[in-house]
Amino acid sequence: MSATATPSNVLIVDDTPQNISLLNAALMDEYSILVATSGKQALEICQSMPVDIILLDVMMPEMDGFETCQALKSDPMTSSIPVIFVTALGETRNESRGFACGAVDFITKPIRESIVRARVRTHLALYDQNRALELQVLERTAELNATRLEILNRLGSAGEYRDGETGFHVLRVCHFSYVIAMAYGLPKSEADLLYNAAALHDTGKIGIPDSILFKPGKLDPDEWQIMRTHCEIGHKIIGIHQHRLLDAAASIALTHHERWDGNGYPRGLKGYGIPLFGRIVAVVDVFDALTSVRPYKAAWPVSEAIVEIERGRGLHFEPKVVDAFLSVLPELMAILQQFGAGSRARNGTGEAAG
């Protein structure tokens, strides 16, 4: 070990002072020694400070070594710490039980200092290698997730540009969805998932002809039927996946035009038969569409758009989602201001909404 390296923390757990002294003498020149005289104290130490390896006696009162090891391995905070049993119990059945509890090695008493040092050094090296590999995996996973999210955002933007937008509609829908999901009571992890998946809600518009997508007037019945197919098209483009993000994105693309009363499309789902993410994005998409300039309409004042959302409670939209929407209006207005695109709706006072 170099002069500047921080020594590893070795926790000795034994209720016999003589045994502690022997182990301490064998290791104190190379490591920082921590001592616990009971299983309970060992658990407390591991919860309060970094421990790199544990030398654990078996025969202790109240909580023996096997029970202590099981407790360590059942806690995510301590489960990765290597445990070496140091005990006078040398029978094969005791070794088997120790390994079954999660120990990495078994040293029988009376100990030899050279054996203890060699075993500790070996398992610390393996532990360091495992931690380095875990860090590499986490870094690689983060890189892959970032790449995946960027691809999804690009694909979402492709559908948006086909609709005559400039990149802000997807951002607004994602941010609106996140804020409403949190107000609805979803865990942050689920709100984050919705934020990323919502970017692909209109991907299916890639498959809609320009003559329909950019028509300045009202669509005729045949054109409207073609427009409605963008939900199924988006669902097919994203496909069916086991990955939660892509699965959520496909579900949103398919269901964000379903209605709470069952009169939506493409499948006429009703009530809680509509996935929750689809129910949230339904409100978000209508609100953003109403307050945005589109080829077929001018932007509505924000105040009128809010009234329209309230009017859809229990008909177009789930009542609880509408309640969540209304409870975070100041945050939604801030998003409109931050990600407004060109000519947008004005609020009831005549001031620009964003």
Image (spheres, grey):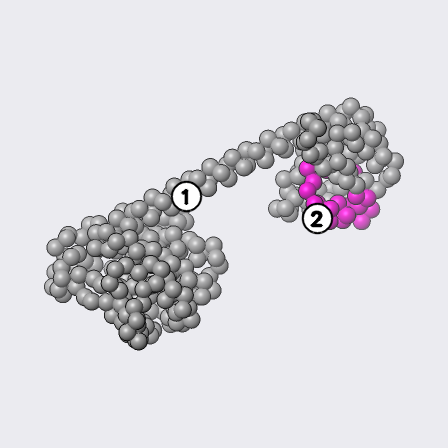
- What residue is rendered at 24% in x and 55% in y? 165
Q: Residue 98 appears at what percent x and percent y?
A: 71, 36
**Residue span colored magenta:** 36-63
Report the side of 177 relative to 24 (left or right): left
Q: Which residue is mark 1?
A: 146
Q: Dot 2: what SS?
A: helix
**Is 170 on the left-hand or right-hand side of 187?**
left
Quadrant of image for the C terminus: bottom left
Please give the label number shown on residue 48. 2
Regarding mark 1 in the picture, which secondary structure is present there?
helix
- Quadrant of the rendered image containing residue 341: bottom left
Is residue 195 positioned above or below 269 on the image?
above
| Residue type pointed to by label 2 | Ser
Mark 2 / mark 1, whichever is N-terminal: 2
User: Which mark is on residue 154?
Assistant: none
Number of numbered discs overlaid on the protein picture: 2
For the N terminus, which image quadrant? Answer: top right
Amino acid residing under circle 1: Ala
Circle 2 Cα neighbour tier, 10 Å, few/some/many (<14 / 14–19 / ≥20): few
In the rendering, at what x and y percent does residue 317 appear?
33, 69
Q: Is residue 293 visible?
A: yes
Q: Residues within 10 Å of mark 1 (few under 14, many from 20)?
A: few
